[in-house]
Image (cartoon, grey):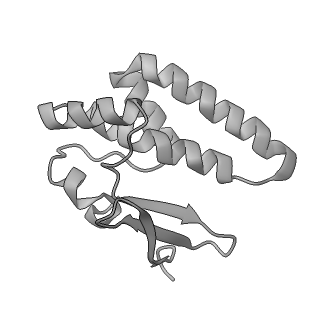
């Protein structure tokens, strides 16, 4: 994972980076936040089961997108991060400044939070090597 993969506000306060993948999130939560790990596992398995019917991995990506910042926070406890963690757990995603939305062609549409608080299209992110 590169520095560009992490929102600047979060990166500035992070010491340990967590890859934005199911295995990395699971490993981090299982080691540092077992209670949340159980919930992640439940949501992940449910998304996988639903995706088995129509081969649409969008549900799985949504679970990863939801739990990645929580895993990052678990790996980097600090007063500010703990405040962000509580807001995210309570459904306030205002601290998340960037969101990737997978596309059928293998790219990601990147949305960033604007000054009004809305997620707006920013650019297309191409897989590495393209």
Q: Residue furthest right?
A: 53
Say which residue appears at 28% left-offset and 47% top-offset.
17
Residue 19: percent from left, percent from top: 39, 49
Residue 86: percent from left, percent from top: 31, 29
Say which residue appears at 46% left-offset and 69% top-offset.
110
Q: Residue furthest bottom?
A: 130
Residue 1, by quadrant, is: bottom left
Q: Residue furthest front?
A: 116
Taking the image as shown, residue 4 lies to the left or right of residue 78, namely: right
Say which residue appears at 51% left-offset and 73% top-offset.
127
Compare residues 17 and 101 and report the one nearer the observer.
101
Residue 31, by quadrant, is: top left
Say which residue appears at 45% left-offset and 79% top-offset.
123
Residue 24, by quadrant, is: top left
Taking the image as shown, residue 6 lies to the left or right of residue 12, namely: right
Q: Is 42 located above or below residue 126 in the figure?
A: above
Q: Is 112 located above or below residue 86 in the figure?
A: below
Compare residues 97 and 26 and report the one nearer the observer.
97
Residue 82: percent from left, percent from top: 22, 30
Compare residues 55 and 88 and report the one nearer the observer.
88
Q: Residue furthest top?
A: 35
Q: Is residue 76 visible?
A: no
């Amino acid at each position: 994972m590169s520095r560009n993969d992490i929102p600047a506000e979060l990166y500035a306060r992070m010491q340990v980076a967590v890859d934005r993948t199911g295995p990395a999130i699971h490993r981090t939560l299982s080691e540092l936040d077992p209670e949340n790990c159980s919930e992640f596992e439940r949501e992940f398995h449910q998304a996988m089961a639903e995706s088995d019917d129509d081969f649409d991995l969008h549900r799985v990506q949504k679970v990863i997108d939801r739990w990645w910042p929580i895993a990052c926070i678990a790996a980097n406890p600090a007063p500010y991060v703990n405040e962000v963690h509580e807001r995210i757990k309570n459904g306030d995603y205002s601290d998340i400044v960037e969101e990737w939305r997978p596309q059928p062609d293998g790219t990601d549409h990147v949305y960033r939070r604007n000054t009004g608080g809305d997620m707006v299209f920013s650019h297309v992110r191409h897989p590495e090597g393209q």
